[in-house]
Amino acid sequence: MYIKTIEPDEAKDDIAALYTSEIASMGRVMQATQCWSARADVIVPIESLLHQIRDGFSLGLLNFRLITLVAAKFVPSSYCSHVYFHSVSSMIGRDQALAVYRDFRKAGLSTQQVEMLAYAEQISRNASEITDKNIQRLRDVGFTDINIADIALAASYRNFMSRYFDAVGATIEPEFLDPDDEVRNEISVGRKS
């Protein structure tokens, strides 16, 4: 980490509660969480926004994580790519997750999921190029405006988070790194882990 953050044993009040909750659920405080503690006034609202977007996501947790994985790849963010590759692998299996990561268009996903991920990719590459035609493609495969807003929120949130993590030097925790060096290198799309 490039900046000074609040260590778990130094945390107080809201930050201590946030850290304690993360330790209880994950066994550790992730650098992705800890890096926000440099701005102690924003860590709780940032985490709250993540939970609000993810927990109320109209397309389910798997699709939220698929969007996050694809967005992270195109930011590009090694940190988030590794974390979400690990997360998606636990839900659909490593081989399927790797197929999605390599080319979601050829990974055996539904037409809806492919369109969803193409939109997330476009948001990450250059959202200013999105037009009504792109939105109509989403509607044509059955997405509602709420679904479209959720896809845009999930991808945009990941862009924001991933860029901040890289900017302050968050490093990937070893348990999120794939044991295969070739896969690990492939997923390291930005800063090398």
Image (cartoon, rainbow, N blue to C red):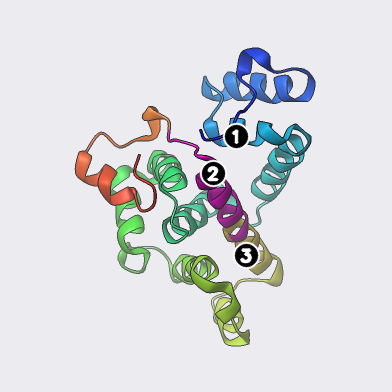
Q: Which mark is residue 165?
A: 2
Q: Regarding mark 3 in the picture, which secondary structure is present there?
A: helix
Q: What residue lies at 35% left-to-right and 53% top-to-bottom?
A: 189
Asked if the stretch drawn in magenta spans residue 160, the answer is yes
Q: Nearer the viewer, residue 161 or 40?
A: 40
Give amino acid for label 1.
Answer: Cys
Residue at left 35%, top 39%?
Answer: 193
Pair 3/1: label in front: 1
Q: Would you identify the image quadrant in which residue 41 lies?
A: top right
User: Viewed as shown, does residue 153 lie left or right of 2?
Assistant: right
Q: Which residues are magenta?
A: 156-172
Residue receiving disc 3: 152
Tags 3 and 1 touching, CB below 8 Å: no
Cα distance in 3D space between marks 2 and 3: 20 Å
Give coordinates of residue 174: x percent, y percent: 37, 29
Q: How many marks?
A: 3
Q: Earlier in the sequence, mark 3 or mark 1?
A: 1
Quarter occupied by residue 22: top right
Q: Are marks 1 and 2 in contact (CB under 8 Å)?
A: yes
- Badge 2 local density, few (<14 within 10 Å), some, or many (20+)? many
Image point (22%, 38%), residue name: 180
Amino acid found under the numbered disc labelled 2: Phe
What kind of secondary structure does the magenta stretch mostly adopt? helix
Q: Nearer the viewer, residue 85 or 111?
A: 85
